[in-house]
Amino acid sequence: MALYRSVREPELALTSWDEPMRRAFVAQQFDAQAAQYRQHYPGAEFLLLQLGDAVIGRLYLHRTQRELRLMEVTLQPSERGKGLGTALTKALLTIADQQQLPVTLHVEPFNPAYRLYQRLGFTKLREHNYYHFMQRLPIIADTSR
């Protein structure tokens, strides 16, 4: 929940809520997100990223026969900007290429990760509410060599 809150902190800073109200809001939003993920992505993998004993992030994935959906990558504020999100995304793209699966995701266009996804070959397919739905097609390995 603390990790989830770290992402929502800029929004909370805009409110005049006291700390109990902020905690209640974050808990409600966290629970709603978890319910939505379970409903729409049955069988998804909800992974915690650890460095030693410390949880430094979370990685949520949903694999089907048709795609690898990157549902979420969240890193602790102290771990952001160090290239970990890029490394994780590149590793997922390698796996998807090996399995010849497209990788899809939803991202807000103002999210700093949006530019990363563009650099890694994702293209916007459509907009839905505040999110852009992006896809990166698998790279076909050259087997003629």
Image (cartoon, rainbow, N blue to C red):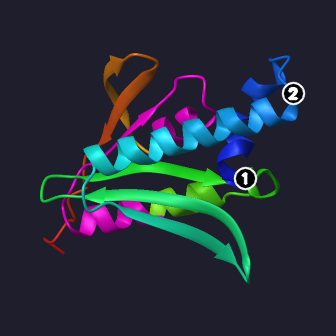
Q: In which quarter of the image is residue 19?
A: top right
Identified at 37% across, 58% down, the residue is: 61
Circles 1 and 2, Cβ within 8 Å, touching? The answer is no
Would you place residue 140 above or below residue 32 in this image?
Answer: below
Q: Mark 2 is on which residue type?
A: Asp
Q: In the visual, does 131 lie left or right of 10?
A: left
Residue at 39% x, 45% y is: 35
- What's drawn in magenta, residue-wise? 91-119
Front residue of this view, candidates 68 and 10: 10
Q: Which amino acid does label 1 sit on?
A: Ala
Determine which residue is flagged by label 1.
2
| On screen, residue 95 above or below 19 | below
Q: Distance between the residues labelled 1 and 2?
A: 17 Å
- Residue at label 2? 18
Quadrant location of the C terminus in the rendered image: bottom left
Residue 100, magenta (yes or no):
yes
Density class for disc 2 (Cα within 10 Å; few <14, some 14-19, many ≥20) is few
Q: Which of marks 1 and 2 is nearer the N terminus?
A: 1
Q: Determine the secondary structure under disc 1.
A: helix
Can you tell which of label 1 and label 2 is closer to the viewer? 2
Residue displayed at 40% across by 25% down: 132
Farthest bottom residue in view: 52
Residue drawn at (51%, 44%) of the image: 31
Give residue 122's position: percent from left, percent from top: 38, 38
Secondary structure, mark 2, is loop
Whether residue 51 sits left or right of residue 58 in the image: it is right
| Residue 45 lies within the magenta run | no
Lateral position of residue 85 relative to residue 128, left or right: right
Which circle marks residue 114 in the picture? none
Measured along the vertical axis of the image, is residue 134 above or below residue 83?
Answer: above
Looking at the picture, tell me which residue is in the foreground, 25 or 72. Answer: 25
99 lies above or below 40 = below
